[in-house]
Image (spheres, rainbow, N blue to C red):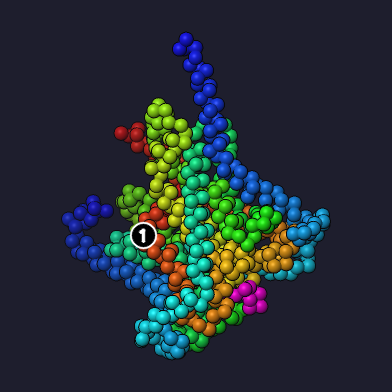
Amino acid sequence: MATTSTTLSASTPGLLKRQSVLNGIKLGGTYLVLTFFAALISIPLLWILSTSLKTSTQIFTWPIEWIPNPFRFENYPEALASRPFGTWALNSIICAGFSVIGHCLSATIVGYSFSRMRWSGRNILFLVMLSGLMLPQEVTLIPQFIIFSKIGWVNTLYPLFVPTFFGGAFNIFIMRQFMLTLPKDLDDAAKIDGCTHLQTLFRIILPQVFPALGFIAINTFRNRWNDFFHPLIYLNDPKLFTLALGLRSFMSEYMVEWSYLMAASIMVMLPVIILFFFAQRYFIQGIVFTGVKG
Amino acid sequence: MKIASFPKLRLKLSTQDEIAGWLFALPWILGFLMFTLGPMIWSAFMSFTNYDMFKWQWTGLANFRRMFLVDDLVLRSLGVTTTYALMSVPLHLTFGFTLALLLNQKIKGLSIWRTIFYLPSVISGVAVIIMWILILSPEFGLINSMLAYIGIKGPNWLGSPQTALPSLVMMSLWGVGGSMLIYLGGLQGIPTELYDAAKVDGCNDWKSFWNVTVPMMSPVIFFNLVMGIIGALQTFDTAFIATRGGPAFSTYFYMLHLFTNAFEMLKMGYASALAWVLFIYIMILTMLVFRFGSTWVFYEEAFRKDKKSKVRKNV
């Protein structure tokens, strides 16, 4: 591009000027379209934020009162106090927390085996795992439910996190790909120094794979926090509800109290939003990685 | 002495490695047997029975016969699900790709724009669905209030059979930032030399879009297409929370039918048959896309290897 523009400027300065004007218009148009889409995408969030701070009469006024006057911050504590949100939050944290530990641990160990250890059957089993990546969950869903119900785990939180300790194909795949990029000399040096595989993994390899672990942890947390389907089939007792499930039961009872509903929804979204702002790098790295390499 | 013991030591080490390798992979192997392979075999078996959590009887093909001859909700929900996929997948592709193209220019504040577009796809879940239920509410929802400014009386979005399914498509489009980011990653990976070369060859922006961007992006587009189809056919949460399949079954997704049969009526045998039919349907569609994809997806690897060896020769 640089070469073409210099030749152009040497011969026809007028053309270059026209081109830069054209580029300016193009860039301006880009900003215009981007602003339009950005508004379209963020207005819903702004609207529920404002709705969550309104009294019930303010909500139903037209034209829309974007900045509520007065702000009604009491909606938040009142909404939270009306149902056992604390218990639900704790359940969500237990499920998401143990799932994060489970997936990180299993992905690291199994990923190490699939990437840095030599054993027969490794390649075949890896292929089996890859074919499982595309497998939709509905075929395994019903037998899994039956297993968990036969061992008495329905209406407990166990089905929501215990399977993560056995590894997820996708996370193991990510970890394996990441570990393959580390130099083989690391293991050899550790071996010469007399490290066992466990020592090599936890002392030498683990500190190198934090980016992959970060992605797995964040992705797992978000998926588990937002998961609705599994809590729905496994939990009946309102005391065991996760936030996702509790929020829905809250919705069916408080459909008229919009401000409460919105206040509660925002509180449920908040942890993920905060996490997103602190760990955006991992989110973006991961999604690009999965998209391009997947 | 030393030389003689050496091979023995190596053999010992490799058997040790062998055992260690299997041991380290054991969690996944067990998990695969318990949560994937075992359940798959079991569910295939169950689909030929009338298992209801307590007793079972071999019923042969009765479940499948019932699905297509008696239970008219099966084909209906399959139709709803397919229509939804046909609407949402192309729209996601178009909007995701367009946004990525816009962001892939020399614009200021890329990370801020990216955050704005990507955030909604991160905070999916029940809270977002509830937000949309209120936004789409006929009287005082955001959309109809906005439409009222220009004097249009908006429809009863989720409440009428004509608009309910398109409303769900619109809801899903709010999360388009996820696929946008994948496209953006792909776009940033296209080497700039290709565009320079196209310019030297006399391509304008439009031509270089079709001759450089689209071929280079085709694997990413293909990936998003396949994942989009699989995801759309498994839609459950939005429909279950926002409409419960109504009104008049206009949003009665296949997964809702499966859920009702399995977890409300406990017809596990029949629901397993439903699951397998959906699985096969997804497989067929995916294979069609793969078949169709081989005609337009451009894989760089072979090409790049070729190019690299040529470059080396030139040097």
Residue B277 can be seen, yes or no: no
Q: Position of residue A191 (x, y in %)?
A: 42, 29
Q: Quadrant of residue B313?
A: top left
Residue at left 28%, top 63%? B108
Q: Is residue A165 magenta?
A: no
Q: Position of residue B206 (x, y in %)?
A: 38, 60
Kind of residue indicated by mark 1 = Phe
Q: Observer-nearest residue: B202 or A281?
A: A281
Residue at left 41%, top 81%? A74
Q: Position of residue A29 (x, y in %)?
A: 32, 70
Q: Which residue position holds label 1?
A: A278
Note whether A211 is above or below B151 in the view shown.
above
Farthest top residue in view: B1
Residue at left 32%, top 62%? B110
The secondary element bearing badge 1 is classed as: helix
Query: Which chain is indicated by disc 1?
Result: A
Residue at left 23%, top 56%? A5
How many badges with numbers are in the image? Answer: 1
Q: Observer-nearest residue: B58 or B277?
A: B58
* Secondary structure character of the magenta stretch overall: loop
Q: Residues within 10 Å of mark 1 (few under 14, many from 20)?
A: few
Q: Give the magenta-colored segment's residue range.
A: B242-249
Q: Quadrant of residue A218?
A: bottom left
Q: Position of residue A76 (x, y in %)?
A: 43, 77
Note whether A176 is above or below A138 in the view shown.
above
Residue A140 can be seen, yes or no: yes
